[in-house]
Image: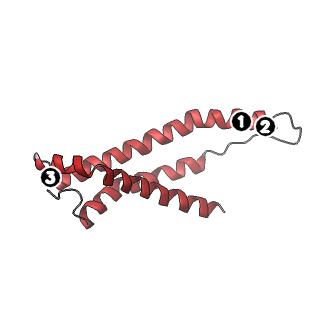
């Protein structure tokens, strides 16, 4: 069950990255027309993806953890047989995976398609 969830999350993130690049096709054409190289555009998109991953994990590890604790406590906090334990290492284990995906997908799309610099 967990492996299925992780696989779905990774595919969803890849789809989000691809869709984000595809939606910016016109802007990327303009950047290419004014002199940005394909390599520079791919690097810019990679940095954007890395920033998105870092921001997402920062929010999840702060606000998300707090909300998780509050919601679980409200639902089951009064039960004697319940004890709250939040395991954070899976979140930290996912960060490098998503950083690699965020850095490589824009470069793969740029190399495999003429999306980035089709003028």
| Quadrant of the rendered image containing residue 76 | top right
The percent coordinates of residue 94 (x first, y second) are: 52, 52
Could you give the CA–CA distance between mark 1 and mark 2, rounded to whole angstroms? 6 Å
- Local packing at callout 2 (Cα closer than 10 Å; few below 14, some 14-19, many 20+) is few
Q: Which residue is mark 2?
A: 75
Looking at the rendered structure, the secondary structure element under dot 1 is helix
Which residue lies at the image location 14% right of the left edge and 48% below the top edge? 36
Relative to residue 2, is residue 96 drawn left or right? left
Could you give the CA–CA distance between mark 3 and mark 1, rounded to whole angstroms? 48 Å
- Local packing at callout 1 (Cα closer than 10 Å; few below 14, some 14-19, many 20+) is few
The percent coordinates of residue 44 (x first, y second) are: 26, 46
Q: Please identify the quadrant where the N terminus is shown.
A: bottom right
**In the depicted view, which residue is nearer to us: 110 or 100?**
110
- Local packing at callout 3 (Cα closer than 10 Å; few below 14, some 14-19, many 20+) is some
Which residue lies at the image location 23% right of the left edge and 46% below the top edge? 27
> Eyeballing the image, is 71 above or below 11?
above
Q: Which residue is mark 1?
A: 71
Q: Which mark is residue 37?
A: 3
Looking at the rendered structure, the secondary structure element under dot 2 is helix
**In the depicted view, which residue is nearer to us: 93 or 61?**
61
């Amino acid at each position: 069950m967990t492996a299925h969830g992780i696989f779905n999350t990774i595919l969803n993130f890849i789809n989000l990255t691809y869709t984000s690049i595809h939606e910016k096709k016109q802007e990327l054409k303009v950047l290419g027309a004014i002199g940005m190289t394909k390599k520079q555009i791919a690097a810019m998109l990679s940095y954007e993806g890395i920033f998105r991953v870092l921001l997402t994990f920062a929010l999840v590890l702060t606000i998300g953890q707090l909300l998780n604790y509050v919601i679980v406590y409200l639902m089951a906090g009064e039960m004697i047989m319940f004890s709250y334990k939040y395991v954070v290492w899976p979140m930290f284990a996912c960060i490098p995976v998503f950083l690699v995906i965020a850095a490589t997908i824009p470069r793969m799309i740029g190399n495999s398609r003429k999306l980035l610099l089709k003028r």
